[in-house]
Image (cartoon, rainbow, N blue to C red):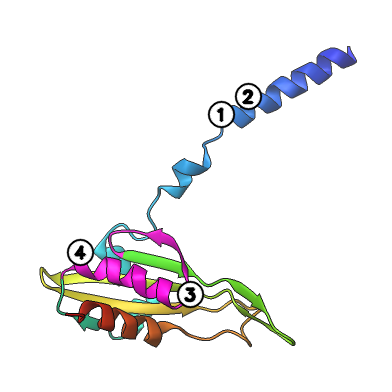
């Protein structure tokens, strides 16, 4: 009786595990699949964009490179959105790093792209963290204006 109950329990657990969706299915869902979804973000609504006289196809890789230059590991790269995270570092009194830097993209024409950079600070490391918005935008400008 106990063996049957144990076997049934194991089979049920195995069946549930096999039936659940894999991590890949969830990770393929885009955070910002359209320009409308980008324009509805509170940070985007409240802040003026930086405008680049380049197509979104040129601006998107520049955003990823700029995030890498400021020390971010790219975690998400979509048509209208790029996100990176800086590694956590431990200091003497407080940890630093761990910021998530998001770049929102909106093609306003074929040769013009609106860009917003937004740094999320974590509650735990907020004292040792900083905003990377301007550094990312400056690096994008440097990359896009390179001869």
State which quadrant residue 142 falls in. bottom left
Q: CA distance from mark 1 to mark 3?
A: 39 Å
Q: Magenta segment: does it hold 65? A: yes
Residue position for label 1: 19
Name the secondary structure under disc 4. helix
Name the secondary structure under disc 3. loop
Q: Residue at x 10, y 68 (%)?
A: 110
Q: Residue at x 70, y 20 (%)?
A: 11
Q: Please report whichever mark, 1 or 4, sits nearer to the chain's N-terminal start.
A: 1
Q: CA distance from mark 2 to mark 1?
A: 6 Å
Name the secondary structure under disc 1. helix
Give how far across and how far down residue 34 sits, in percent.
Answer: 27, 60
Image height of 147 relative to 73, above or below: below
Residue position for label 3: 71
State the extent of the magenta-drawn residues as a range. 55-80
Residue 57 image label: 4
Q: Please report whichever mark, 3 or 2, sits nearer to the chain's N-terminal start.
A: 2
Residue position for label 2: 15
Give how far across and how far down residue 90 sits, in percent.
Answer: 69, 78
Which of discs 1 and 3 lies nearer the camera? The answer is: 3
Q: CA distance from mark 2 to mark 4?
A: 44 Å
Q: Residue at x 47, y 42 (%)?
A: 24
Which of discs 3 and 4 lies nearer the camera? The answer is: 3
Badge 2: how crowded within 10 Å, few (<14), some, or many (20+)? few
Q: CB atoms at circles 1 and 4 under 8 Å apart? A: no
Q: CB atoms at circles 3 and 2 under 8 Å apart? A: no
Q: Magenta segment: does it hold 125? A: no
Badge 4: how crowded within 10 Å, few (<14), some, or many (20+)? some
State which quadrant residue 3 falls in. top right
- In the image: residue 57, left or right of residue 11: left
Residue 40 in sight: no
């Amino acid at each position: 009786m106990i063996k049957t109950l144990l076997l049934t329990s194991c089979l049920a657990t195995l069946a549930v595990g096999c039936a659940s969706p894999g991590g890949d299915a969830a990770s393929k869902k885009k955070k910002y699949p359209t320009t409308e979804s980008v324009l509805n973000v509170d940070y985007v609504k409240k802040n003026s964009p930086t405008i680049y006289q380049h197509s979104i196809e040129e601006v998107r890789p520049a955003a990823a490179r700029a995030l890498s230059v400021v020390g971010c590991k790219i975690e998400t790269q979509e048509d209208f959105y790029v996100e990176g995270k800086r590694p956590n570092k431990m200091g003497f009194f407080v940890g630093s790093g761990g910021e998530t830097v998001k770049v929102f993209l909106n093609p306003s024409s074929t040769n013009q792209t609106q860009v917003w950079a937004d740094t999320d600070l974590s509650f735990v490391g907020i004292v040792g963290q900083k905003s990377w918005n301007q550094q990312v935008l400056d690096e994008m400008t440097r990359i896009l204006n390179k001869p």
